[in-house]
Amino acid sequence: MPPFTLPFEKPVFDLEKKLHELEDFSKEQDIDVSHEVERMKEKIKATREQIYSNLTSWQKVQVARHPERPYTLDYIKHMTTDFVEIHGDRIHKDDRAIIGGFAKIDGQKVMIIGSQKGRDTKSNLICNFGCAYPEGYRKALRLMRLADKFNVPILTLIDTPGAFPGLESEERHIAEAIAVNLREMFNLRVPMIVTIIGEGGSGGALGIGIGDRILILEHAYYSVISPEGCAAILFKDRAYADKSADALKITAQHLIENKLADEIVPEPKGGAHTDHEAAAANLKEVILRNLNELKQLSEEDRMNGRYDKFRAMGVFEE
């Protein structure tokens, strides 16, 4: 039995339950039901594919928040080798909501930086549920500058509801920390690839979200505000989150249509949470291809392209 099942996954859960009962019956009674088992597995696969091929915007948000979804450290484990984590911002403390360090991906040196959530209450408290403080963004910028100094490409992985909005963040100037990151990331000379792997929430995501290429996983989302927050403001009721998710146009497909992202990274059928290794393999392939393309460009062309990309966002002609 899976530890967590989304509401719309119930048909798959019911079929898997029947499959386990059938397998148990086969063992207890010593009866060969292999044909029925295979047929049931095929039905489960087809049902899962049908469900995940027709997800609404709100359902995609739920998948992006799935507690079993791979986080930054999972992608680092499956995509890279020789990872050396670098801690702290050298000003306040080490923020565990943002992880980063040097690593190799297919032998190529990279600086990989990403949001990190926890799997249980204890680890979530350590990571502050993936919501970084100002020192998290300052740590990220320190690592980016280090990568730029040694001419090492930068990969960022985004999965955060947003920057931490509490009093401590305001006292330590969260807005200024994010703003400085936005300015400085445009001036870095090395190739930069950003990937939204889960939640891409507001300025907290954008604080490590400037890059030459913006990738997004198939069931991730990127938004200026959460659907619940939008519903509370527009409809005065968070129960309208599903309607808000549709209106916000926050899914990977919407981002591609509006030229806010460059490429969708496919996920395993049933979402990245069903197979961490396959999800990481898909992302690794897309990152390497884009990284090789960016390396063919001159430093000036890369930086100009990065600037033009973000200047064009939000510009529409009737």
Image (spheres, grey):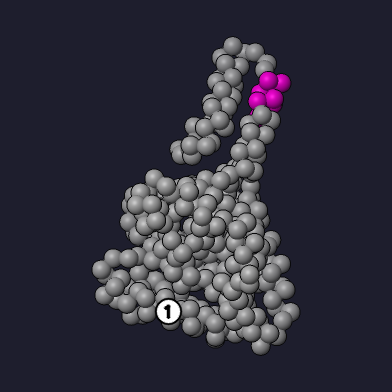
Of the pair 51 and 73, the residue shown nearer to us: 51
Label 1 crowd bin: few (<14), some (14–19), many (20+), radius 10 Å: some
Q: Quadrant of residue 314?
A: bottom right
The quarter in which the C terminus is drawn is: bottom right
Of the pair 290 and 63, the residue shown nearer to us: 63
Q: Quadrant of residue 212?
A: bottom right
Q: Residue at x 63, y 72 (%)?
A: 317
Above or below: residue 196 compared with residue 68: below
Residue 194 in view here: yes
Which residue is tagged 1? 179
Kind of residue at badge 1: Ala
Of the pair 242 and 70, the residue shown nearer to us: 242
Q: Name the residue at the front extreme.
A: 318
Residue 286 lies within the magenta run: no
Which region shows up in magenta?
35-41
Please state the horizontal and vertical placement of residue 138, each as a whole percent of the image: 40, 77
Q: Is the magenta stretch mostly helix, strand or loop?
A: helix
Please state the horizontal and vertical placement of residue 244, each as a whole percent of the image: 47, 52
Above or below: residue 145 compared with residue 26: below
